[in-house]
Image (cartoon, grey):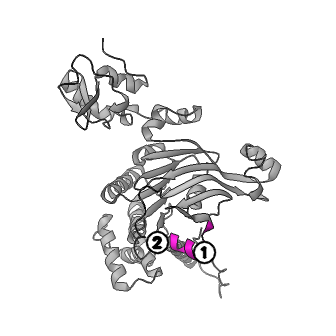
Amino acid sequence: MSAEKADPPATPAAPATAETAQTAQTAQTAEKAATAAPAGGPAAPADPAVPVFSVRGLWKVFGPGADKIPGSAHADLSARELRERTGCTAAVRDVSFDVHRGEVFVVMGLSGSGKSTLVRCLTRLIEPTGGTLTMDGEDVLAMDRAHLRDLRRHRASMVFQHFGLLPHRTVLDNIAYGLEIQGIGRAERRARAAAMVEKVGLTGMEHRRPGQLSGGQQQRVGLARALAVDPEVLLFDEPFSALDPLIRRDMQEEVIRLHREEGRTMVFITHDLNEALRLGDRIALMRDGRIVQLGTPEEIVSSPADDYVRDFVRDVPREQVVTVRNAMRPAEDGEGRSGETVAPDTTVAEAVGTVARSGAPVRVMEGGRCLGVVDAGCLLAAIAGEKAVAAR
């Protein structure tokens, strides 16, 4: 999907071989990714109180008369009924959320849930059918082509599932490609690309070509290319789904590390619940184009909104997600005055060792204040999905 409408390609003078066709297709994909990415440094600092993205009542409907569906009697039809009666498909249905500055916002759902369509609507790679959408308070849907191009080039960069690397270029030149498209001089773009090589752990591989890299290394190149243009927000569209489990975990660790170091806002699309729980500050879980629950990983695991979400999270190890803030009980009989302590965001799994060593209730402390205590009974109740009870 191109970031901007382009003129139709010229008819080739002669048939291409399979190899040259594949190379041309890969180059075209990379150019689209680079064009969609920002360049020339970040935009002016925005008001931290204003959401990076604010979405209200967003729709994306495909089919004849799509613009008539939102707000009509057809809007509440099931996906099947809507197709049968109108010939339309609602990929995104009346979706509302904010993405806060500096957070990792994960959109999760199964295939066909609308998650990838939604992330493409954020920069109008796919045009929304209805609703409102702002970035840093600016109306994205009202932007003309010039302003939209500026948003894509300077403020939001996408990391794709299929890396779109140029097979005839080195790692360094692939990373610098987005900067080259934007007209950055050779010396500057190579210097910025070299810094990204080190940042994503590819030092020593600068002169290799994509065919000489593993899948995980290729994805690191794609990530470095997006980072090289220093965007305000990174959009990840299932970037690790094609990778082997161990490599996928390494790349998740890389995203966690980069976010910890830079605090960059990220919107991450995935169908993997474990990945969503591992990466997300908040998760929007989608089904049939709608958000069925939006909350922190702990909120979704502890308080599923319906049977669909409950079925999703039933095999999640609760002790890895639930924190002692939601497992503690009130302190009694001087329990809050002395003894071992844990922070309220400590997971139940992390607190087990402290409680076992202590042999007594452990204080949950925040800012010098005792919020409550946890003991073995509290931890077991949290794992079982039950409420903690006071000691007798």
Counting from the top left corner in percent of width and height, residue 332 is at 27, 18
Residue 49 against residue 166 in the figure, above or below: above
Packing grade of label 2 (10 A; few <14, some 14-19, many >=20) is many
Residue pointed to by mark 1: 145
Q: Mark yes or no: residue 75 visible.
A: yes
Which residue, given by chain and number where applicable, does mark 2 sit on? Answer: 154
22 lies left or right of 264: right
Which residue reaches farthest right? Answer: 85
Looking at the image, residue 94 sits to the left or right of residue 122; the answer is right
Q: Give me the residue at 40% from left, 32% from top.
A: 318
Front-lying residue, 339 or 4:
339
Residue 225 x %, y %: 41, 70
- Residue for point 49% across, 32% down: 303
Image vertical order of residue 97 relative to residue 40, above or below:
above
> What secondary structure is the stretch in magenta mostly built from?
helix
First of labels 1, 2 by sequence position: 1
128 to 323, vertically: above or below: below
Foreground residue, 117 or 331?
331
Q: Which quarter of the rendered picture does the N terminus lie within?
A: bottom right
- Label 2's element? helix
The number of callouts visible is 2
| Extreme residue toward the top, this view | 392
How far from the left and from the top, in percent, is residue 185? 38, 85
Q: CA distance from mark 1 to mark 2?
A: 14 Å
**The C terminus is located in which quarter?**
top left
Q: Do tag 1 and tag 2 residues touch (Cβ < 8 Å)?
A: no
